[in-house]
Image (tube, grey):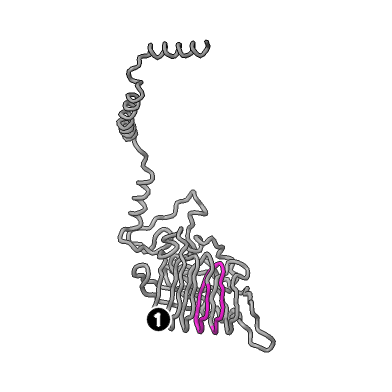
Amino acid sequence: RRGETYLKPPGSLGSRWPSLGISLSIECCEGCSIFILDTTEQVQIAECVDCRVVVGPCVGSVFLLDCSRCTISVAAKQIRLRDMKDCELRIFAPTHECAVVETSSGLAFRSWDVAYPGLTAQFAAARWDPSVNYWNRIYDFSPAQDGAPPTFSILPLEEQVSNRWCELSIAPQGLCSGSVEERCGSEASVPGCECPCAAADGTSYCAGSGVVAKHNPREDPTTEAPRPTVGDNLNVDGSFRLGAQPTAQISSTTASCGSSAPSASLFAEWISGFKRLVDPLLASAKSILGLGATSPAATTSSSTASTTCIMQ
């Protein structure tokens, strides 16, 4: 594929189906823009040239293979690079040395820079601490030999500050398409975009009227998170609403179905129906065993006779 835009918007992958463990594989792209903006279990990107790639929170591994002259922003538990050439990596690394390089050259690393709607909720779903980013702790499996150029470099802080943030304005169309407008600069300016982690120089992301850090109901279960109103673009979990029914209406319907308790009349109806089903079966069983024709007196005398016989 050449010169195309591939978009998986927020709410199209792990946020929509959290129990499936969704994986993606993309290969053989040239001059393309690839945006995977939802949580995933595993991502593999191979044989891409001159591409812009953004991979949102991946709770497993992201494999980058045989790519050249690409600019890649990736947030993942583990980032594996092999046979990569002349690429810039903008990473969020939640653990020490989770970015691993092998048989690559001309790589440049810098801190994660992307902001888009729903990113805060995705970081929370991945259970990452956004204040901890080991973006400059790279492990090289095959370091350069004496006299050879280094496998990778760390971009100086002053170069990162000039393009501190990359903000994405998303216009999704369904689950697999849409358009993305990318704006890069030193200051945040696109309302609705979010980035829970700070830049390399410690600057927190702010856009519009205030800081994008949102209330997380998991942290304070006694406080209810505000519900979206009709016309909002996002669901409660931060994903884009892709259906026609407003989120507030869906939430209220679900709550009413889950909280209503069966009435006493409904229990009485259940019991009556159960008796109507069981009583004919009991009557048939008594008739077959001959229990219905035996009187209490006969039963008593028969039991006494049997006992006397056994004792003699």
Q: From which residue to which does the magenta span run?
A: 63-86
The amino acid type, in three-letter code, at marker 1 is Arg
Residue 295 against residue 134 in the figure, above or below:
above
Q: Estimate the x, y position of residue 124 in percent, counting from the top left.
A: 51, 60
Q: Quadrant of residue 297?
A: top left
Tell me which residue sits at (34%, 54%) in the image: 250
Tell me which residue sits at (42%, 60%) in the image: 17
Query: Depth check: 236 or 260 in front?
Result: 260
Q: Estimate the x, y position of residue 173 in percent, counting from the top left.
A: 34, 70
Residue designated by label 1: 1
Residue 2 against residue 239 in the figure, above or below:
below
Query: Depth check: 61 or 274 in front?
Result: 274
Judged left or right of residue 197, residue 281 is left
Query: Depth check: 170 or 16 in front?
Result: 16
Magenta stretch prevailing secondary structure: strand
Q: Secondary structure at mark 1?
A: loop
